[in-house]
Amino acid sequence: MVSFTALLNRAHRRFIDKCLQKRGFGACEACEKRSLLIHYDQKDGSEVCEWELCEGCYDRIVESDIK
């Protein structure tokens, strides 16, 4: 079960990533589709992975993080 605070923080981050970042046009690193890209930093323990994702792939990754 995810806490309400965690859901609220993820929603806030999603809003910032989609609406307030400057987004570039290019190929998505996950599906290779050309579109506006969202810069996403995924933290796994001590490692930080940086992704340039289309909106569909970004939504799938964020939804999988919630579960």
Image: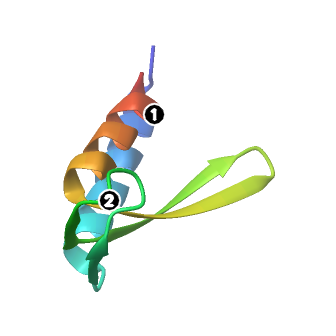
Q: Does residue 19 sit above or below 28 in this rendering?
A: below
Spatial CA distance of label 2 from label 1 is 22 Å
Residue 9, percent across and down?
A: 40, 48
Residue behind mark 2? 32
Which amino acid type is shown beneath numbered disc 2? Glu
Q: Quadrant of the N terminus?
A: top left
Name the residue furthest front. 32
Q: Nearer the viewer, mark 2 or mark 1?
A: 2
Q: Residue at x 30, y 56 (%)?
A: 14
Residue annotated with mark 1: 65
- Label 1 element class: helix
* Mark closer to the chain start, 2 or 1: 2
Element marked by disc 2:
loop
Vertical comparison of 25 with 40: above or below:
below
Q: Residue at x 33, y 33 (%)?
A: 63
Residue beneath the point at 27% across and 45% down:
59
Quadrant holding the C terminus: top left
- Say if mark 2 contacts mark 1, CB within 8 Å: no
